[in-house]
Image: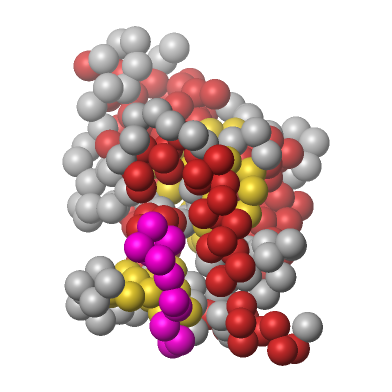
Amino acid sequence: MPPNRYAKRYGVRTDLDRCRSAYPSRVNSPPAPALPATHRRILVIDDDPTVSEIVCRYLIAAGFTVEQAPDGLAGLRQADINRPDLVVLDRMLPGLDGIEVCGRLKATRPVAVIMLTALNGEEDRIDGLEAGADDYLAKPFSPRELVLRVQSVLRRNTPEPAAPGATVAGPFALDLAAHEVRMSGVPLVLTMREFDLLAHLIVHPHRALSREDLLKSVWGWDFGDLSTVTVHVRRLREKIEADPTRPRVLNTVWGVGYRFDPLPVDEKASPAHDLGARR
């Protein structure tokens, strides 16, 4: 396909076409990123497989962990399971359009959204921004510019760094040197294995982890009784959940395992033994 037709059809500028000329089958060598991405998770929702492939390749080359979804409903499902840091969202999707998807994403949890669109009128941009999009990129676009915008949006949405030695996830602060986890400033009383499990979850928030993964990562076992993980998860919930029977922080992902979703700091989560008096 000639470069001008490629750019017109897929909404990507001709710097991609030059890459296509060097690598006829696909784009294999996107440019190096300007800043390290530190494994932030990006979800690309676009029904055009070519645009999606190119965007994903550039983001992966920039150091991001990238997932794809071909439509709005699939994107919402993936976002619910994998909790991305940022969503690259096409404005014109089959079924649920990008405006509706953006609104639903923003209604469920804080997540950055960059909207892609072939509609570059002022009203279209306003619609996207009013739906909650953090940035808006009109087609045709440069994938290198998209990577820079992703980095910029993530910088704006990154909280101030914690004190040295501490890892923060929502109201949880992990201090490995002190062997301590604080929840909303209150130290949690944990057994050694409970501490190891919660520390692993704090370092890997919003990721669906199987019991096998946790058994290997936390216990160091390649195989063993998976009920060990189940029991420790139950005990941990009793210490960090307001209602352990209806968890909001350490959630079950059916058919997969567990996911640690620390509540936003502004929800003022407190240790379970403090909340028990209010139930």
Residue 254 position, x and y percent, is 68, 39
Residue 107 position, x and y percent, is 71, 64
Residue 122 appears in the picture as rendered: no
Q: Which residue is drawn at 31% across and 11% down?
A: 24
Magenta extent:
185-195
Asked if residue 272 is positioned above or below residue 137 in the image, the reply reads below
Nearest to the observer: residue 25 or residue 56: 56
The reply to whether the magenta stretch includes residue 12 is no
- Res 75 → quadrant: top right
Residue 198 position, x and y percent, is 43, 61
Nearest to the observer: residue 97 or residue 160: 160
- Res 92 → quadrant: top right
Image quarter where the C terminus lies is: bottom right
Nearest to the observer: residue 129 or residue 37: 37
Instruction: Name the side, left or right, on which 2 lies relative to 129.
Output: left
Residue 185 position, x and y percent, is 44, 87
Nearest to the observer: residue 46 or residue 222: 222
Q: Residue at x 56, y 80 (%)?
A: 271
Residue 265 appears in the picture as rendered: yes
Which colour assignment does the render follow?
secondary structure
Asked if residue 37 is positioned above or below residue 263 in the image, the reply reads above
Instruction: Name the side, left or right, on which 86 lies relative to 164.
Output: right
Asked if residue 189 is positioned above or below residue 185 in the image, the reply reads above
Image quarter where the N terminus lies is: top left
Q: Residue at x 62, y 87 (%)?
A: 274
